[in-house]
Image (cartoon, rainbow, N blue to C red):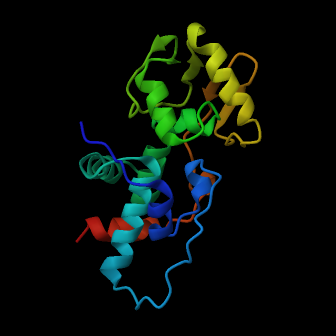
Amino acid sequence: MAKNRQPVLKRCRTLGIEPTCMGIDKSSNRNPRQGRRKQSEYAMQLNEKQKVKFIYGVLEKQFRHYYELATKKDGITGEMLLQILESRLDNIVFRLGLANTRREARQIVNHGHIQVNGSKVNIPSYLVKPGDVISVKEKSMPRIKEIAEANARRIVPKWLSMDKENLTANVVSLAAREDIDYEVNETLIVELYSK
């Protein structure tokens, strides 16, 4: 299986992303690139696509599949694409503060520490639906509780409700466009794919 092994801070600097949206509290010591010439329209579209792919840890084939799902849904395609990416199980584990980064959340799900509606789910790309209950396996509680306490300052989005004592959460609704906490112009991604 393909893995993304790019250095996070270096990639964040290239794409213009704050490392905090990746769950990393460091910042790069290097100077930002200066004197770059004006980007073409295609370069801006590609940059937006690469930014979203990097944030969610999704590779091209899967990202293309999510785009095709978004085009079939009712609503604005760009917003539907972000909604699908936000409803991935690894992203929800990260959003709830049960993992420090999305990569760690992916590993936690892969190792079978998370349950959805009482059943073990070890697929990070599992798409949750409104009404789903996400919980931590009994054996995994102590370790994940430590991580959750370290991430206590992380704000849980309003489309999720969390019980911090039992480490369970309910998916109240799917994410809306205003729930996305990083800057992205999703219309550029749609324009890139619709060529």
Return the residue nearer the eye: 119 or 24: 24
The residue at 45%/68% (across/down) is 15
Return the residue nearer the eye: 146 or 81: 146
Residue 53 vertical position relative to residue 15 in the rendered view, above or below = above
The residue at 55%/35% (across/down) is 92
Q: How many marks?
A: 0
Residue 10 vertical position relative to residue 152 in the rendered view, above or below = below
Judge whether residue 168 can be spotted in this image. Answer: no
On-image quarter of the N terminus: top left
Question: Is 19 positioned to the left or the right of 190 in the image?
Answer: right
Judge whether residue 155 can be spotted in this image. Answer: yes
Residue 25 vertical position relative to residue 50 in the rendered view, above or below = above
The image position of residue 62, as x and y in percent, is 28, 45
Return the residue nearer the eye: 29 or 4: 29
On-image quarter of the C terminus: bottom left
The image position of residue 111, as x and y in percent, is 43, 20
The residue at 56%/65% (across/down) is 183
Return the residue nearer the eye: 139 or 48: 139
Residue 47 vertical position relative to residue 103 in the rendered view, above or below = below
Quadrant position of residue 178: bottom right
The image position of residue 136, as x and y in percent, is 58, 17
> Residue pushed farthest front?
29
The residue at 47%/91% (across/down) is 35
Question: Is 168 positioned to the left or the right of 191 in the image?
Answer: right
Quadrant position of residue 142: top right
